[in-house]
Image (cartoon, grey):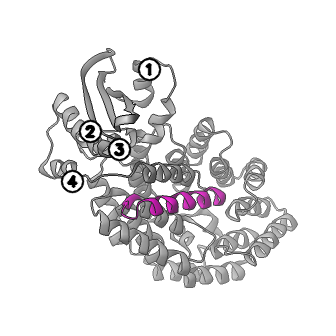
Amino acid sequence: MTEELINALAKISSLRVISRTSVMQYKGVHKPLPQIARELGVDDIVAGSVANFSPTKRVRITVQLVDAATDRNVWSQSYERDLADVFALQDQVARNIAMQIRVQLTPQEKLRLENTGSVNSEAHEAYLKGRYHWSKGTAEQLRQAKTYFGQAVEIDPKYAPAYVGLADYYWATDELPPRVAYPKARQYVMKALALDNTLADAHTTLGAIQFYDDWDWSSAEQEFKRAIDLNPSHAEAHKMYSVFLSSLGRLDEAIAEIGTAQALDPRALSPSVTAGWTFNYARQYDRAIEQCRKSLELDPQSVAAHDCLGDAYLGKGAYEQAIAECRVVAGGSSDDPLRLVGLGTAYALAGRRAEAEEVLAKLQAASKGHYVPPYLFSIIHAALGNKNQAFSWLEKAYDEHDAYLTRLKVDDAMDPLRSDPRFSELLHRMRL
């Protein structure tokens, strides 16, 4: 119910609605509402309770709208529904809340709030578990996410978000070649859009596919903007649009967009780490270090945050600090080749050539068991000064439509190659 009410309120463009990832961190936490509001940066809080009457399969839902500054109850109402209808209730609640805070709904918003079908609660629960694992970002967590998304589809074959989840697994995984993964991603997202073309998640995912696989910058941007239009409070859409803008070198826009994503999901790790990478690509390394440390405050064990921090230290030429961070990364996710690259690069730039070549050998060995993106090899070769080998791997990345090639324009790992005419020619072919 919490997830569905957040999604319903987020459809109203004049409201800024905090994402579930941040909101659910306060579940069971005994803090005064004004304090929670300050931490989330909001003016009002929606609170409620659900009572389940098992024999009758009826539920009673009580909803309160609280003014966070005064801790005053502005409005409350109770609803009683059949359990099967509970997920359709959130749109009525959202309309009532909008009336209480005197928000004017556009005709399109009214239509979106009226066109809500029933949701199978078991499918929804499996989907949410999948999203939890997907947000962690490691290879192992992505595999677990795929399992839960698949369960959601089995439970309810008409549940569109589950197909989006499967599509997200396939475009995000590094374990399959792009020519295998992306057709599956496209198949699943188009299935989701056929079921519900107003689903912001689906448009975000289609934008990601057009960005990472098609290299169709115009169509990708249209999809990201469409997702944000459908759900202005969709933190993931703002985050992905920021990644897109950063890769195209539109760095000021990217920084602003990731700032919006963080404001919408202030307690979530993923937009926080993405902000760190955005600063790295903008060559604002001190800001990146500060941001990565904030990410580690959210999750001290975050492999992604340590990876970003290591890259920022590399940018500043602080090689020993970079090596220390990259060792944490390599030790924390030994089955993920992506997490070895930073260590190999740090060794190479620090002049520790033999150790860098050992990392290359590990990547080569890993590639015999499963797919390893060619771009990762080019990064270490570039750091070692092996220009011809680096360009050979970049050509392989181009031929295979390696998703990491989209960062070619802004990735400082490519700086040793930028003066070579082959680099400019590759950028031209990618229309970057």
The verdict on residue 154 being magenta is yes
Q: Main secondary structure of the magenta part?
A: helix
Q: Which mark is residue 15?
A: 2
Q: Nearer the viewer, residue 328 or 120?
A: 120
Q: Which mark is residue 35?
A: 1
C-alpha span from label 3 to label 4 = 13 Å
Mark toward the viewer: 2 or 4: 4
Q: Nearer the viewer, residue 402 or 2?
A: 2
The verdict on residue 13 being magenta is no
C-alpha span from label 1 to label 2 = 20 Å
| Apparent side of residue 54 relative to residue 336 in the rendered image (left or right) | left
Q: Which mark is residue 115?
A: 4
Q: Which mark is residue 230?
A: none
Q: Which residue is mark 3?
A: 4
Tell me the crowding category of disc 4: few under 14, some 14 to 19, or many 20 or more residues within 10 angstroms, Cα based.
few
Which comes sooner in the sequence, label 3 or label 1?
A: 3
Image quarter (top left, top right, bottom left or bottom right) of the N terminus = top left
Which comes sooner in the sequence, label 1 or label 2?
A: 2
C-alpha span from label 2 to label 4 = 20 Å
